[in-house]
């Protein structure tokens, strides 16, 4: 490949080195590729199909070699349909998780959308036996341009069925919007990340307390 391609691969990897895996579940990390959702500060990590491949490598779905092969496929062609499919999957998962967090009554349309993409994902899945037991395997991950969505959707389904949904939370920063699974012993985690939103909240509280003392 030419220098422009190599630069693209390098830049994509460098971009996602700073992406924090604070969701504690790959499907939540996928939803979290939008920061400050529905605010003027909104930041979109996945602006292109190739960005999505960089994210998939960051979370461990792809090896570096597979990432480069798929980037090559999308390098000099229109990948807008692949990109749109990725974003639509993310929207569906966000709606599902948000419905759970808000403890709303079951929304048939939300669950229908989830089941449609889940059935498509599991149609291509197989069960593998390994040294420690059994696991899902998705052969199309390396072949299909959007194959990485299959294990993401499957992870979301397993997560909903097997996990304690009282631990599924939204960051307490009202602007942040990131979702996470609280693994603390007493279910007390409030922030997506203590080094980010948690630290900012502490700084703001400290500032307000000291300002109030001055008056």
Image (spheres, rainbow, N blue to C red):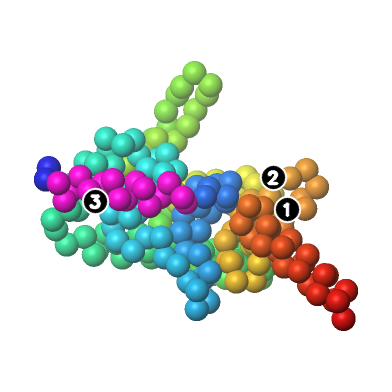
Give the percent coordinates (x, y) of residue 166.
72, 55
Q: Residues within 10 Å of mark 1 (few under 14, many from 20)?
A: some
Q: Which residue is found at the position 14% from the left and 58% from the top?
A: 77
Residue 92 appears anywhere in the view: no
Q: Which residue is found at the position 17% from the left and 62% from the top?
A: 78
Q: Earlier in the sequence, mark 2 or mark 3?
A: 3
Q: Is residue 1 left or right of residue 193?
A: left
Give the percent coordinates (x, y) of residue 32.
50, 58
Which of the two residues, 131 or 207, is positioned nearer the viewer here? 207
Q: Secondary structure at mark 2?
A: loop
Give the percent coordinates (x, y) of residue 31.
49, 59
Give the magenta range: 3-19
Please state, as top left, top right, bottom left or bottom right, where the N terminus lies in the image: top left
> Residue at the top extreme?
131
Q: Which residue is found at the position 31% from the left and 37% from the top?
A: 64
> Residue at the front extreme?
214
Please state, as top left, top right, bottom left or bottom right, where the C terminus lies in the image: bottom right
User: Residue tagged by mark 1?
Assistant: 189
User: Residue tagged by mark 3?
Assistant: 8
Q: CA distance from mark 1 to mark 3?
A: 37 Å
Residue 94 appears anywhere in the view: yes
Q: Which mark is residue 183?
A: 2
Judge whether residue 6 is colored magenta: yes
């Amino acid at each position: 490949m030419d220098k422009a391609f190599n630069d693209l691969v390098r830049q994509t990897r460098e971009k996602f080195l700073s992406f924090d895996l604070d969701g504690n579940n790959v499907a939540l990390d996928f939803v979290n590729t939008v920061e400050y959702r529905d605010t003027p500060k909104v930041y979109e990590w996945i602006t292109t199909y190739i960005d999505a491949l960089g994210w998939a490598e960051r979370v461990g779905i792809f090896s570096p070699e597979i990432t480069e092969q798929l980037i090559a496929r999308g390098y000099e062609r229109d990948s807008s349909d692949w990109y749109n499919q990725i974003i639509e999957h993310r929207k569906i998962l966000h709606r599902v998780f948000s419905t759970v967090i808000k403890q709303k009554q079951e929304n048939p349309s939300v669950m229908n959308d989830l089941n449609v993409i889940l059935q498509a994902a599991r149609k291509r899945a197989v069960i593998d036996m390994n040294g420690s037991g059994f696991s899902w395997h998705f052969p199309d991950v390396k072949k299909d341009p959007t194959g990485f969505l299959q294990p993401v959707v499957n992870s979301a389904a397993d997560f909903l069925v097997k996990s304690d949904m009282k631990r599924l939370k939204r960051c307490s920063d009202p602007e942040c919007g990131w979702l996470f699974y609280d693994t603390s012993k007493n279910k007390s985690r409030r922030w997506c990340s203590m080094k980010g939103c948690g630290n900012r909240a502490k700084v703001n509280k400290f500032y307000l307390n000291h300002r109030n003392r001055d008056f």
